Image (tube, helix red, strand yellow):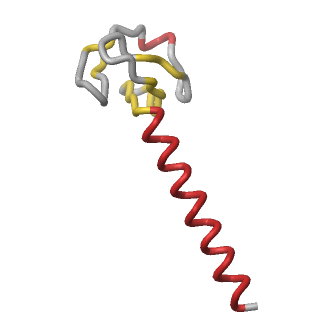
Amino acid sequence: MVTCPVCDGAIDVDEEDVDEGDSISCDECGADLKVVGTDPLELESADELEEEEDEDYVESEDEDEIEDDWK
């Protein structure tokens, strides 16, 4: 049993059947979740992970533009 990071609801999942990177959903709130760790089982909102990836991409683009300006 693991807790949903969005609504704190209990999620009944067989921890041996999931691997890091797997997607599951919360039965209570319907949130899409990603397995970010398996020992212990850790879940994170898939939406938050996508936002973090988008922010990292924008930062990388900005750094490239700054480097190009100095050339």
Q: Quadrant of residue 41?
A: top left
- Identified at 38% across, 17% down, the residue is 30
Residue 35: x percent and y percent?
A: 47, 27
Which residue is more in the foreground, 18 or 57?
A: 57
Q: Position of residue 11 (x, y in %)?
A: 32, 13
Q: Nearer the viewer, residue 28 or 37?
A: 28
Is 60 placed above or below 66 here? Answer: above
Residue reaching furthest bottom? 70
The answer to which image quadrant residue 64 occupies is bottom right
Work out which quarter of the rendered image holds the N terminus and state it.
top left
26 in relation to 49, above or below: above
Q: Is residue 1 left or right of residue 22?
A: left
**Relative side of 63 to 24, left or right:** right
Q: Position of residue 62 (x, y in %)?
A: 60, 72
Residue at (73%, 83%) from the top-left corner? 68
61 or 10: nearer the eye?
Answer: 61
Quadrant containing the C terminus is bottom right
**Residue at 39% from the left image edge and 23% from the top image edge:** 31
Q: Residue shown at 67%/77% (left/top)?
A: 65
The image quadrant of residue 56 is: bottom right
Q: Position of residue 47 (x, y in %)?
A: 46, 36
Image position of 13 (left or right of 61):
left
